[in-house]
Image (tube, rainbow, N blue to C red):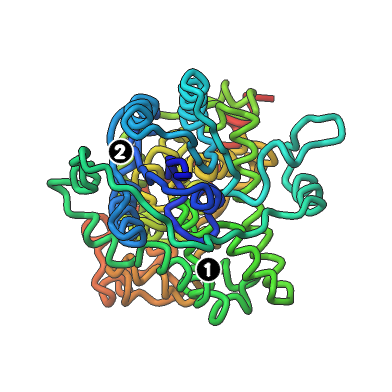
Amino acid sequence: MAKEISIVWFRQDLRLSDNPALTEAVQAGKILPIYILDDCAPKPFNIGGASKAWLHHSLENFNKSLGGQLNIYAGKTSEVIESLLQQYGVKNIFWNKCYEPWQVKQEKDVKTLCKGNDIRCHEFNGNYLWSPNEVLKDDGHYYKVFTPYKKRAYLCPPRKTVYVQDKPQCIKDEKNSISIADLNLLPKKLNWHQQMLKHWEIGEIAAQKKLDAFIANALSGYKEGRDFPGQNQTSLLSPHLHFGEISPAQIWESIDRVEGPDQEHFLSEVVWREFSCYLLYHFKRLHADNFNAKFNLFPWKDNASHLKAWQTGNTGYPIVDAGMRELWQTGYMHNRVRMIVASFLVKNLTIHWHRGRDWFWDCLVDADLANNSASWQWVAGSGADAAPYFRIFNPVTQGEKFDKHGDYTRKYVPELKDLPDKYLFKPWTAPDEVLRAAGIELGENYPKPIVDLAASREKALDAYQTLR
């Protein structure tokens, strides 16, 4: 008796290992592996430029893992799948769930289609440790504060890894001529992505290598070292996680074998990723609306020149500028610096967190709707379990504390490389002779501060008082 043909619908799970949907489908027989580019998100949440570039290469690597048998399509997901059901007599569809609102709508449409065609749907949690409905209060409501969520989550065993035992028997859709290149994920004019991607290896193999290297070289000392952008003390796994080149369960099990405070602290960061997705699932407008509704009345400013200076790393505050330039050059920004630049935008410049959200969404290779939205709302003070609005990061003292000798700042703001440490994070205070010796002319080859820190802080606090 011939085994049934199953569709495996890949999205943010571009890996062979620990892929529950793929593992179950392979046991059922031959598979038709598909990826559909269906950028159905509303603006400004269409796939960002950096994410597109990463996705192109991630798909190429995943296709190689499947022996060139990954079938690529573009269009409305339910319509593409409907045509394949008719063409191949498919009886099963397998997928790992995603939780962005438009992805949830995609899944609902596919379920409706399958119900009308007597097709069996098989959904799995392959992208998170816990499904969003798994960690709830005793009264059935969801948690809005991280620590109680984490404590409750730890009472539920995280998802265990699963692995394909047999080589997938893949079917190639010979009638389909669409290639990965046809998806036009790489920009045709701006070649910025080529420089950006030089900083990365992409794909499942690269993700596993990065995890192994992190455990061997950087996990020890992570709890303290992660705050210092000049040190190589972070995992850099976030883009691999977003595209599903590695799963959080694989990371969890690997890190959990190591004992000590650094292991515990890193796993807590993994749980923050879970919490962000959890918030988006239960508060479906997290990406657009203030979680704390009182911020709907905040008097944000719309200053195009200030926004442009922030985006391009020309604010006159070196640690801020270093972070924004790192973002543009590498598609990534160190987490400590993300908090500094975000605080500067929403508090010193009082520009709406939406503007920062959108810039990060376009420029980050790890742009994730839940993480990006929850993090921006956390800094803005409008989110769940957020930092209070009056907690304003001072970019001078933050630079002096976390980049004491300026290794990070001088790397991305090289025009300041010869400025003594004493003045590096406040060059406007340096005597003229010191500036001349360092080859710096403020306002010419490095900008003067676009706002005064003390004055802008007071204005931000005054604006906050209007909400009370």
- Residue placed furthest toward the right: 138
| 135 relative to 3 in the view: left or right | right
Tell me the CA gap for discs 1 and 2.
33 Å
Question: Which residue reaches farthest left?
Answer: 189
Q: Position of residue 270 (x, y in %)?
A: 62, 57
Q: Can you tell which of label 1 and label 2 is closer to the viewer?
A: 1
Q: Quadrant of residue 245?
A: bottom left
Q: Position of residue 351 (x, y in %)?
A: 45, 35
Query: What secondary structure is marked by label 2?
Result: helix
Q: Is residue 432 left or right of residue 236?
A: left
Residue identifier under label 2: 305
Q: Residue 415: horizontal and vertical position, in percent?
A: 27, 68
- Observer-nearest residue: 54 or 36? 36
Q: Name which residue lies at 68% across and 65% down.
A: 265
Residue 234's disc is 1
Q: Earlier in the sequence, mark 1 or mark 2?
A: 1
Task: Name above or below for residue 284 compared with residue 26.
Answer: above
Question: Quadrant of residue 163 in the image?
Answer: bottom right
